[in-house]
Image (spheres, rainbow, N blue to C red):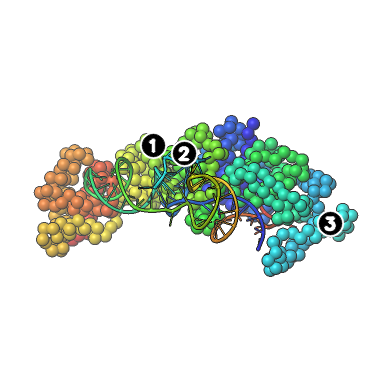
Amino acid sequence: MVRVRFAPSPTGFPHIGNLRTALFNWLFARHHGGVFILRIEDTDVARKVEGAEEAILSSLRWMGLDWDEGPYFQSERLPLYQEAARGLLESGHAYHCFCSTERLNEMRREQIRRKMPPGYDRLCRSLSPAHWEERLAQGITPVVRFRIPLEGQTRFNDLVKGQVTFNHSTLDDFVLLKADGFPTYHLANIVDDHDMRITHVLRADEWLASTPRHLLLYQAFGYEPPQFVHLPMILADDRSKLSKRHGAVSVTEFEEQGFLPQAMTNFMALLGWSMDDHTEMFTLKELVRYFSVERLARTGAIFNREKLEWMNGVYLRKFTVEEFVGMALPYLGRDLPPSVSRPLDRDYLLQMAPFIQERARTLGEVAGLADFFFLAEVDYETGPLLKGMEKDARKQGKAAAEATPMAVQALDKAMEAIQQAAEFEPEPLEHGFRALGEELGLSAGAFFGLLRVALTGRTASPPLFNTISILGRGRCLTRLKAARKKLS
RNA sequence: GGGGCAUUCGUCUAGCGGCCAAGGACACCGCCCUCUCAAGGCGGAGAUCACCGGUUCGAAUCCGGUAUGCCCUACCA
């Protein structure tokens, strides 16, 4: 029975790399009909961030990654680790270290200065238990360190990296139990993975170098180690490790920006995993079906936001208009200016939605794409308004200044046409306006461009006659009048 | 400084000794569609497979070395 875990530490909001690790663990568990366990590794009291735990849970839920056990909290299992450390102390695999932080820092500084590999110099390694009692009696709180074998090597077969070998001489006597009674990652992790009967450890590449320590610990405890699978990391644009300073990387932020969980999981899966040479779109269900460790990549991947945006757009377009409106509504409510009265008219929204849906890559873009449908008045410069007219004037051999009277006339005629239009539907409107354009001797580009800017305040918009039809007679007239006023 | 891992178009990747003068996707460019912007369709440009040797009839694929990058080297995880 496959048993895997996602074991984040609540020292910050979960970023894309953390969640991808969660995704792969989850996929592995579901693919094999195994168990996915959630464990919060909150052993660092000082670095604990308020709200991080909740963010981890909600991000997992948002992505649709459900867990079968947990969340377990290491902070609630302290006796377990202390007991384990005691066992190691008794079996001689660990020892008390009374070195002060100052001495340790000084030692490290000196090692670096002399270009020696930094690491604990094992001063306390040879202290006898009798000495321990003595120091303990003095009130010095020691840490517990692991006694790394001085010779030999540890090798293991990583399911992604293959055979990896480390010489024990490059490992130092790392800390197992801190002075505050909390275990370090290394201790807690091994104790828990054993206790929870974890069969496969899928974790980020950055842990590869710690694996020999972990294996040595398993050995010291007499535990059977799990299989290790070190996942390639997700990197920032400069190929360094992803962190806060690289901008929006927490999953919560992606949600706020209007990315869909379907797109996130699909995209994240493709960062370090692939099925073949051409398939790109996967539902979670399909990922479960096809996921395999053998197809995991070995190299780090830069997070390509543009491709994520493209993919999110593809997903957005898959939904029905009703579904799209349902998803966009909260974002619209949040992003539209306060002057727009709430609640938003759902029927009105339904009319424009198909045109917005086709253009939006994220739900966060919807308000910016659709705001002119809601605003009382649109704001713009006369430059864009007259651009097409000036071009037409030039073509007709007139001065550029002629553009304004031409536009004014066109606006007047357009208002008349709007008022008199029998059917306020895109088709008949288009016929009417095309005829009108010809009558005025204007090119379609110039005439429609003028109307577009006057009605929407922008040079790019959904198709003009759909826009007119949706806006309705009243709004169109008001805006055309405003444009006319702007020109005179 | 030591150790480990990695290295295919700008980016994500396919490739596991001959099917590759390297395939797909995003981005980019052009054309078509067209009232603009999208979406869609078609096409283009873009990688001497980091480099140098070796093994082999044959190497992006196997082996060595070099370079570069990343990670670890905390009483952080």
Quadrant showing the N terminus of chain A: top right
- Foreground tag (2 vs 1): 2
Q: Nearer the viewer, residue A280 or A84?
A: A280
The numbered mark, 2 or 1, whose residue comes first in the sequence reads 2
The amino acid at mark 1 is Phe
> Which of the 4 image quadrants contains residue A325?
top left
Considering the numbered disc 1 on the image, is that residue within a helix, a strand or a loop?
loop
The amino acid at mark 3 is Ser
Which residue sits at x=19%, y=51%? Answer: A445
The amino acid at mark 2 is Asp
- Could you tell me if the residues under marks 2 and 1 are in contact, i.e. CB atoms within 8 Å? no
Residue A352: percent from left, percent from top:
31, 42
Considering the numbered disc 3 on the image, is that residue within a helix, a strand or a loop?
helix
- Image check: B20 left or right of A66? left
Q: Nearer the viewer, residue A174 or A165?
A: A165
Residue A321: percent from left, percent from top:
35, 37
Q: Nearer the viewer, residue A190 or A337?
A: A190
Mark 3 closeness class: few <14, some 14–19, many ≥20 residues within 10 Å: few
Q: Is residue A330 above or below residue A151?
A: above
The subunit letter for the residue under badge 2 reads A
- Residue at label 1? A319
Which residue sits at x=77%, y=53%? Answer: A150
How far is disc 1 from disc 3 in space, using C-alphas? 68 Å
Q: Which label number is shown at residue A126? A: 3
How far is disc 2 from disc 1 in space, using C-alphas? 26 Å
